[in-house]
Image: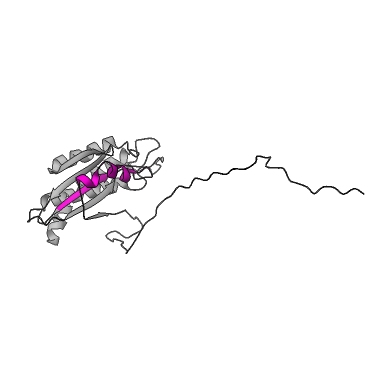
Amino acid sequence: MSNNKFVSFISKNIDHFKAFRRCLHMYPELGFEEHETSHRVVQELDRLGVEYTTGIAKTGIVATIRGNRRDSGRRVGLRADMDALPMQEMSGVPHASRHTGKMHACGHDGHTTILLGVAAWLSENRDFSGTIHLIFQPAEEGLGGATGMIDDGLFDSFPVDEIFALHNWPALPSGMVGVRSGPIMAATDKIRIVVRGKGGHGASIPTAPSTPS
């Protein structure tokens, strides 16, 4: 791949995708409610002439791009999340959230836009062998969107040998990518505890029995 070709591609498309990302940021949607977000993704895939399947785990989408070289049989998945968080945005930027109590505070608007940028590049540069599935996942923020897509037959319909994703990291300098071997970033778990016992007054303090004089 020519570096000049890629730089030219970025220069040509940067304003379009910047505007697209800001549009997503203005209209955030929570998990499994990403109907307008999915619609915007589909419009972009139509513009690029990329085939796709919708309705996986309600609002999930998988786009497929095949290389022009002789098929090696290899299948690679690239995944991005689309949902926002139930938070009020107070940034004051012109493209701040228009939806009260909802915000793309975790950067999934950026993730979705990045994956569409990859779709744009690959749709114009298919000099590779195999198939790439672009997975737009709903409900990453604790609602089980990945499980929902798998339960809906994601890997039956779109089998992959490997799957990759990224997460924005504003603390890194522009142009730098952070990687490591093994797990990275954080995860959350829920623990449910059931306590069984006798009720009583929280302020009650037991005292020693008095001794007769």
Which residue does the image show at 30% across and 37% down from the upper left? 34
Q: Which of the pair 205/169 is nearer the observer?
A: 205
Q: Is residue 126 left or right of residue 117?
A: left
Most extreme residue toward the bottom is: 181
What is the quadrant of residue 180 in the picture?
Answer: bottom left
Which residue does the image show at 78% across and 47% down from the upper left? 207
Q: From where the camera sits, is residue 145 visible?
A: yes
Q: Was residue 175 drawn as part of the magenta stretch in this picture?
A: no
Residue 133 screen position, x and y as percent: 19, 49
Which residue does the image show at 16% across and 46% down from the upper left? 64
Q: Is residue 9 above or below residue 136?
A: below
Residue 51 screen position, x and y as percent: 14, 42
Which region is colored magenta? 131-160
Residue 9 screen position, x and y as percent: 14, 53
Q: Which of the pair 169/151 is nearer the observer?
A: 151
Q: From where the camera sits, is residue 14 visible?
A: no
Q: Was residue 142 drawn as part of the magenta stretch in this picture?
A: yes
